[in-house]
Every structure is written in structure tokens, then in C-alpha cells.
Amino acid sequence: MEGPGAPDVPVARWKRHIVRQLRQRDRTQKALFLELVPAYNHLLEKAELLARISEKLQPEPNDATPATHQGPWEEEPGLDSDQVPSPTALRMKWHEEEEGLRLVCGEMAYQVVERRAALGALESTLEERQSRLAALEARVAQLQDARAQQTRDVDQLRALNTAQRAAYEALRARTRLQEAALRRLEEEARDLLEWLVQRKACAAAERNLRNERLERAKQARMSLELKKAAKRTVSISESPNTLGDGIREMAETVALPAEPVSLESEAGEKWKRPFRSASATSLTLSRCVDVVKGLLDFKKRRGHSIGGAPEQRYQSIPVCVAAQPPTRVQDVLNAHLSEVNAVCFGPNSSLLATGGADCLIHLWNIVGGHLEANQTLEGAGGSITSVDFDPSGSQILAATYNQAAQLWKVGEAQSKETLSGHTDKVTAAKFKLTRHQAVTGSRDRTVKEWDLGRAYCSRTINVLSYCNDVVCGDHVIISGHNDQKIRFWDSRCPCCTQVIPVQGRVTSLNLSHDQLHLLSCSRDNTLKVIDLRVSNIRQVFRADGFKCGSDWTKAVFSPDRSYALAGSWDGAIYIWNVDTGKLEGSLRGPHCAAVNSVAWCYSGSHVVSVDQARKLVLWH
């Protein structure tokens, strides 16, 4: 028999072991019964023999003398009659043998009873095991039926899943076609709108030119009429009615086209005029002066009428038609003395500003694919958390940790204005569409609107959570907060118009150039694209390895809104395709610390990124 550690042990060794045990039991029991049955038969034969002998040995009652009986022992040769035992001795011997046989028979009967009891126990065990085997076989049959049923269900589900996958792919292809058609329609609508705006601008220019010509003609006629009125002789004896008729006549004359008068004739007639009354002349001149003042006032009001725009508005229109994601590094610099928190491109795409924890703002020029220092702006009272150019590119607004926002003019090293009024760190400062209006957000749970012309706060909005970033549209202010919500505020009413919840603290907001989509970055390590036309989350971008490194990590759209760009905690820059919703790729190399902010120039040719290790990287 093979041991448990022997190699090549058969799979069904336990079956053979059971068979061997059963055979061994059968042999043992059979051997016991084979010994018992012959002994019992031999015992019965002896009992019959003794019974016959006893019958023969019994004497007849009529015999006086016992007759000599010849028994079986007489057959033995060589025995004499003197050696034959007496019947009494034989009877005693027989009784002894009978007692011995009875004892042996009793013992054998007891053994038979024990063997029968053991056999009954074995038969009951066998029946129990057979019943258990039958129950297990029934259970196996049930499990096999259940397995077959589950196999059929799995096949049905696979077929259904295949059909649904095919329907999903068809629906997805249809959706892509519809999105492409929608984008084409949007582009056509945008082109049509631009064409309409250009036509209106041309029509307005033509109308303004016509009005200016009419205005100049009217002024020329008025000057001629004034000259004619100055030549007229008015008598002091004229009655008021006559004077009124003269004034009415002058007014009618003003309305008529005037004939050209030469300066020589005017100078010659000046000495030929008769004497006129001073009072009448004064009245006529005062009336004419009032008319001229009225015309001048009308011209001034016309320049600042309700229909006109009293304040010049700028709209940054990117010149990029189709942006390409960056692929390689062009330049790497240590921009600041400590952590760099913010970066922003100017409208001309060749000037950019960086702000850091060293309380400085550096201006850089991009020349030949390299970064060249332009200017350093000083005067900030704390770490710079946000920088922004005004629409004209002539001013820079920065948010600082000294509870204020500061304004610089490009070309001047010292701060021009300080917007103070917050009671905690200012985390965001952005220009509106006009260069004289701005919005700031702070950790004191307020958002403020500023009139930069007079450097005062025109409106304070109280919110329920820290404000981490703000963006501005035509009539809307959008703020991202620490309570995982994005809030919309109308500049024309004091209340919040809408709240969109996101999963995670909002770190940055970026508005597309068409003001139809909003990109948010949050601490749940995702970027979300919000469609402002229907006010819901359209896409969610995430990637393996992408993680926000701080509460002020900034993400941006490309100028044509085809890509979304954000920096990660490990120094990598991730790019997602907005049209397909997939990860376009990641850029690694120069950054060895968390990327705080990224910026994409309006021309689409360059991308810059800054990190917590003072580095400024230019990508192309």
C-alpha cells in the first residue's frame, strides 16, 4: 500500500480503500459463520446419535435380567465382554457428554445471537449509507438541473447583452453624427451671427457717416443764418408782434438752405450797415447763441445716448482656428524665488504674467520659442494667488493673501490701485468685459464687484462657503466654492440664480470664449464640462494618476474649446479631447512637483505651466 507521501497517488485511492475494507469484512464474517455452521451441524448429529443410543439402552420392563445388547461398540474388534462398560457408566458418560454438548451449544447460540446483532447493526448502517447516497444523488441531479438552467440563462443574457451592445454602438454612432451636425450648425450660426454683426457694424458706420454729414451741413447752414441775422437791421420802434414775426422769420430762414456768402462781401457790407438798436441786436444774438448751444448739447447727448455705449467694451476673440495639443518643451526657467501659484497670457499671446508666493509678478515675452524677462511688478502685500489681464492688455489685476486685490498698469513697476475690503485671503480676481470693472472672491465668504474707475466696491455678494475661483460673462458671475458647489449670480439682480453641485471642492473655473461652456476642476480629481445653455454637467474627465495637488489647481480650455488641460500632483500635464471625451495624452519631464496652474495662449501656439518648485515651462 502506497504511503501518503508517495508520488503518482491515484485520484480514486479512497474508493479502493473502501472496497478493500468491505472485502475484508465479508471474509471475516464469512469465516466466523463457516466455523459456526459445521459445528452446529456436528452438534445436531451427536444429539441425534445420543438420542438413538439412549433409546437402545433403555431396558424393557418385562425382562428379569437385562439382556445383552450388542451396540455399536461391540463392533470394535479385539474387545472382550469383560471390558464392556455397564449401562450405568454409559448413561453417566452420556449425561456428561450431553451436558458438555449443551454448554457448547449454548455458547454457540450466544455467539450466533451476537453475530446476528452485529449483522443487524451493519445492515442498518448500510441502509443508512444507501439512503444518504440516494439523497446525495438526488441533490446532485437537482444541482445539475439548476446548472443547466443557469447556463441557459447565461446564454440568454449574453445574447441580450450582445443585442444591447449593438444597439448602443448604433446609438453612439448616431449621437456622434448628430453632434457633428450640431457642431456644423453651431459654426454656421456663429458665422451667420458674425456676418450679421459685421453687416450691422457697417450699417451703423454708414448711418453715423450720414448723420455726421447732415450735422456738418446743418452747422454750416446755421452759421450762414447767424451771419445773415447779424446783418439785419432791427428798429427799436418795432412792436413785440413785429419782433416775434422777425424771430419766426429767422427760424423759417434757418430751416431753408442757405446760399454761400464770401468773406469779402461780408467784410464789405460790414461798413455799409446802418445803425441798429443795441437791445434788438442783443436779443437776436442771445437767441442765436441759445440755438447754437442747443445744437451742441444735442450733439453731446447723442454721443452718450441710451442707445450708445458710454463705456468701451472689449471682447477677446481668439485668432486660433484649430488648436493642437502641445507635444514638446521649448523652454524651462526658475521663474520666482518660491512657489509659483498663477500664470496668465495677455490678449496678444506674446506676453504672459506669473505670480508667486514671493509677492512678485513677473512679465515674460515669448521670442523665438524662448521666454525673456520683460518686467517685474512690485508692491503686493502678500502671496499672489491669481493674475488676470484686462481685455485691452494694458492692466493686470492680482489677488493676494493680504486681504486685497491690486491693480498694475503694464509698464509701471508700482501698484496703481489697491482694492481693499475683504476680511480674509483673496483667492480670485478677474476683469469683466470692460476694463473698468472687476470681480474678486475671498475666503471671507463674499464675492465683490468693483468699479476700477473710482476704486470702490459697487456690490458685495454674501455666500455660504469659501470662494476659490470666479469667472465673468456678459451679465453673469460664476463662483466655485469649498462646499462642492458652483453658484451663478446675475449682475442685474442681487440673488443667486442657480447652483450646480459637484463631487469635490472646486479649485478652478474656466469659461470658453463663446461663453457657452464652463470647465471646472475639483478635489475629487475630475474635470467637468458644464453646458450653460441647459445648465447641466455634460462631460466628466478623469484619468489614472491624475490628482489635484492643491485647492488652487487651475485647468483651462484650449482657445477653440477642443481640449481641456490640467496639471497633476506628480508634475504631469493631462490633456483631454472635449469632442470625444477621452484622454488625449499626458506630458511629463520638466516638472518634479505639483503643477499649480496652466495657461493656453489665444493663438493656440503655446502652453505654459508653473509648479510648486518655482519652475515655468513653455510647451509647443
Image: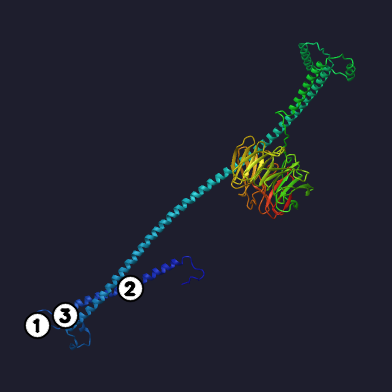
Q: Is residue 35 left or right of residue 353?
A: left
Q: CA distance from mark 1 to mark 3?
A: 15 Å
Q: Which structural element holds mark 3?
A: helix
Q: CA distance from mark 2 to mark 1?
A: 52 Å
> Is any part of residue 170 visible from this angle?
no
Mark 1 — residue?
Answer: 64
Task: Say what amino acid the circle numbered 1 marks.
Answer: Ala
Report the coloring of the rendering.
Answer: rainbow
Q: What is the number of callouts on the image?
A: 3
If you read the primary sequence from the N terminus, does the residue marked by circle 2 or circle 1 appear first?
2
Q: Is residue 152 left or right of residue 237?
A: left
Task: Say what amino acid the circle numbered 3 marks.
Answer: Leu
Tell which tag, 3 or 2, sits nearer the viewer. Answer: 2
Disc ID at residue 57: 3
Task: Say what amino acid the circle numbered 2 marks.
Answer: Leu
Q: Position of residue 375 (x, y in %)?
A: 78, 47
In front here: 373 or 41?
Answer: 373
> Is any part of residue 246 visible from this angle?
yes
Mark 2 — residue?
Answer: 32
Q: Dot 1: few (<14), some (14–19), or many (≥20) neighbours within 10 Å?
A: few
Q: Position of residue 553 (x, y in %)?
A: 66, 49
Quarter of the rendering containing residue 277: top right
Q: Dot 3: few (<14), some (14–19), or many (≥20) neighbours within 10 Å?
A: some
Q: Dot 2: few (<14), some (14–19), or many (≥20) neighbours within 10 Å?
A: few
If you read the primary sequence from the N terminus, does the residue marked by circle 1 or circle 3 appear first?
3
Q: Is residue 346 above or below residue 206?
A: below
Q: CA distance from mark 3 to mark 2?
A: 37 Å
Q: Is residue 185 left or right of residue 116?
A: right
